[in-house]
Image (cartoon, rainbow, N blue to C red):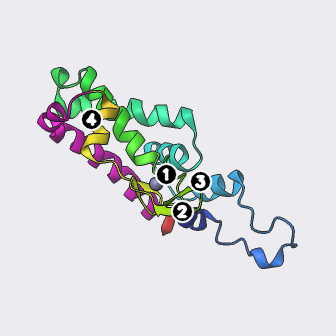
Amino acid sequence: MKTELLAKLMPSSLDISTYGSKNHNAITTEDILIKLSYSKLTENEYNFILAKFLNDDSCRSSVYKNLIKEVHEEFGKEGVNHLVCRFVEVAIMECILTRCPFCNGTGFNVFKTTISKCPHCNNGEFIYDDNVRANLIGITLKKFKKERNKYDRVLELLNEIEINALSKIDS
Ligand SMILES: [Zn+2]
């Protein structure tokens, strides 16, 4: 996924075959920022992409603040409590940190002379199931299931941001 996106982010006018052999495959942060600047992303979309693909922490906290604001409007004042803030944090993690930490995104575990498929991911994309989510949030699975419509809504808002951003970058 990451390489696909980076390919999309490559400035289309840049013909790498005309460049010298050294570093001609290197995509720099500037290349990405230039491409993004032409993509007419909203501030939120821009922050999301930078948070996800360039691991920018300040962009990630902007995404967080903005999402809290949106959730505030949707759930009403009483709706945004400590738990919902944790939902937002974990949902952002789920959307941004997709590489499996157990196999380092390879999809396989190597142990001495044996190789086995990593049980925590799909080809290196970490599986966030409800157990993982409840654990990260710091609540029981039962409590998570009771409140999950809010979590799903937060996730939906984040997915919208990503889908819109990627389609703008792609066009
Ligand atoms: Zn894995």
Among the two numbered marks 1 and 4 on one chain, the one whose residue lies closer to the N terminus: 1
Among the two numbered marks 2 and 1 on one chain, the one whose residue lies closer to the N terminus: 1
What residue appears at the point 64 percent right and 71 percent down from the top-left corner?
12
Total residue callouts: 4
Relative horizontal placement of residue 56, taking residue 84 as reference (left or right)? right
Spatial distance from mark 1 to mark 3, Cα to Cα?
Answer: 26 Å
Q: Residue 152 magenta-drawn?
A: yes
Kind of residue sitting beneath label 2:
Thr
Spatial distance from mark 2 to mark 3, Cα to Cα?
Answer: 46 Å
Residue 139 image-quadrant placement: top left
Circle 3 sits on which residue? 37
Among the two numbered marks 4 and 3 on one chain, the one whose residue lies closer to the N terminus: 3
| Residue 152 visible within the image | yes
Q: Nearer the viewer, mark 2 or mark 3?
A: 2
- Helix, strand or loop at mark 2: strand
What residue appears at the point 82 percent right and 64 percent down from the top-left corner?
23
Spatial distance from mark 4 to mark 2, Cα to Cα?
Answer: 32 Å
Spatial distance from mark 1 to mark 4, Cα to Cα?
Answer: 19 Å
Among the two numbered marks 4 and 2 on one chain, the one whose residue lies closer to the N terminus: 2
Q: Is mark 4 within 8 Å of ligand 1?
A: no
Circle 4 sits on which residue? 134
Do the numbered discs 1 and 4 sit on residues whose CB atoms are within 8 Å?
no
Q: Which residue of the protein is positioned furthest toward the left in this rendering?
A: 146
Circle 1 sits on which residue? 99
The image position of residue 94, as x and y in percent, is 38, 45
Do the numbered discs 2 and 1 sit on residues whose CB atoms are within 8 Å?
no
Residue 122 image-quadrant placement: bottom left
Spatial distance from mark 4 to mark 3, Cα to Cα?
Answer: 37 Å
Magenta range: 139-168
Among the two numbered marks 2 and 3 on one chain, the one whose residue lies closer to the N terminus: 3
